[in-house]
Image (spheres, rainbow, N blue to C red):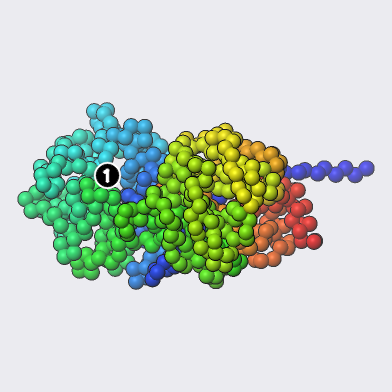
Amino acid sequence: MNKHIIIIFTIKCLFSLEIYSDFASVIDNQTTYERPFLGGFNKPKIQWVDWDNDNDDDLFLLDEDGSIKYYINNGCLNNDCEFILNTTSFYNIENISWFYIADFDLDNDYDIVTQNPNNLETMIYYENNQNNLVLIDILATDSFEAVQSDPVMTPTFADIDLDGDLDFFTGNTVGTVTFYENIGFVDDLPLFEFVTNFWEEIYIVGSSQQRHGASAINFIDMDQDNDLDLAWGDYFQQSLYIIWNNGNAYLANMDIENVISQFPQNDPVFTAGLNMPSFTDIDNDGDNDLFVTVLSGAYGFQLINNFIFYENINEFTLSSLNFIKTVDFLSDINPVFADIDFDGDMDLFFGTDFDPSSFPWHGKIKYYKNIGNDNNYEPIWSFEDDIIIDIDGNNFSPEFVDLDFDDDLDLLVGNFNGEIHYYRNIGDKYNFDFEYVENISNIDLSGYSTPKSRDIDNDDDLDLLIGHMNGTLYYYENIGDKYNYNFQFITDNFNNIDLSFRSSPELFDFNKDGKLDLFVGSGYNNINYYENVGTLSNPAFTLNELINFPNLGNNVSPAIYNSEQIVGMLTGVSTGGMYFLPFENDLFSDLNNDFIINVYDVIILIEYILYNYLPPLSTYYLDINGDFEINVIDVFEIVSIILN
């Protein structure tokens, strides 16, 4: 008798969604953004390092969410540089306000020192061990005390004495510089000796004799005399200080009598203050170019035009106020998609936090019309207009639904005050015309109301789910009908979901089982996915931790984009921009993306089950039947699709 042993491989794993930074194009007046969804920048602290060893400097950027973003430099042509976002959470380092990457142990790879998230005045050292960063310990002195830096400072390292190792410098609140000399390596750690907190008798005081505040410093040989000069951004300085080194590479002698206070001297940078200088030869022409990122100091907040590029053309010449070109509307934007003109494609809208172009400052709703697809079958959105609404306030969160069942899309608007305002479309499905009706049910939540209207209980009318400042979800059931709503408050703690601060819901059948699942963005807890394990009429949402989201930053506001070509999620974030996360391929089950479902797709799936070999796509695509397991059942499913 022949015995056949059948082994079924079942793999339960994290389904990792990834940011797709090349998705779509956005046209805003005369500017075309080829990579519109890079998240925006508010207070970017940057460093240039050739991490991938391809002879150009990549970009590392830390913003207000406390995580390091890594952008791969794919080259520049005529100052038009292509930077690809590789990760928003470099080695999962988080909750820091400064970092420095260098080869500290002189083994020809890059290590990193960061602020210690558990004690912000100290710093920790990560050694690069075969491309894995290993946390070693807190940096210390030869007297066994921690090397310290005021938490508001952005310090730096430099080999000021040309002895082959990196010394440490940090500013002080009184306007001086503290110097720790690197005296060698002990127990896999660089060891430092405290020298002085008044290095070279430098004393920087801001305008009007105000006290010195936070600083961001960097050393660079700007006058090509083979020693390191000091570039200094200060909280009370709208330009840059430059302190020349009149000594030599071994012994610094800083010229404190002739400090440059406006730089570049031919065309000084002028911002809201606390400018961070950095240098790299971005155009590979043999000289260092200047970048100034604005951290915002005593003169307000500069949340755009804050990544300034000066090309070195014999002198530093202003080239751009926004070196990385991406959609950026200052802070906290809430996207939503709707086919507002009934032409068969999804238009893009987003509410903004505030708009300083007119007074008083308040939020706006931006309308970008879908004007077709590019060569990659991805949408092109072009700015049409601001939607005029008759309410003041900030942080608008729009939602488009046919609330009165008259075959056109009406508008709901949440805002900073926690209200939900209703605008009826008195136009038609091709040409909208919104007329204000009311603040629905006199809703007035804790703040930052973000409405989503869906038929949650499957009774053929639209209910209301609202995120708000406290991090829970409010649920209002429509006890009227699809023509005349009557929202009745049910709970302020829907499904016991609590993300602590600024919840923002989105509903979508993610696992393809015919029921609405729930995504909830948050202020500080990224985004969570809740699978609907209930029924159509009685939904029950349970947290599904198999879905792994990349770090998206703060105040995450999700919106589903659903087209025949691609399905995914666009998320607004606190830095005024957005990220796009694709869910599935152009053709469902087309695993190799050749627009044909055939035996080659079956082979890809089997290779993953047998050998854990994963081609360059998310594991989400391999789960053909949507049960969050990848096994032989998915093979049967895809074969069935081919045969049918």
| Relative height, residue 192 to residue 279 (above, below) | above
Look at the image and tell me whether residue 133 can be seen: no
Residue at far right of view: 1
In-image side of 331 versus 622 (left or right): left
Residue depicted at 58% across the width and 64% down the height: 429
In-image side of 459 versus 34 (left or right): right
Three-letter code for the amino acid on which mark 1 is drawn = Thr
Q: Secondary structure at mark 1?
A: loop
Whole-percent x and y of residue 441?
53, 42
Q: Identify the image quadrant of residue 377.
A: bottom right
Residue depicted at 13% across the width and 54% down the height: 261
Residue identifier under label 1: 154
Identify which residue, 394 or 547, lies in the foreground: 394
Residue at far top of view: 144
Look at the image and tell me whether residue 564 can be seen: yes
Quarter of the image for the C terminus: give it. bottom right
Identify which residue, 120 or 145, lies in the foreground: 120
In-image side of 59 versus 467 (left or right): left
| Relative height, residue 536 to residue 428 (above, below) | above
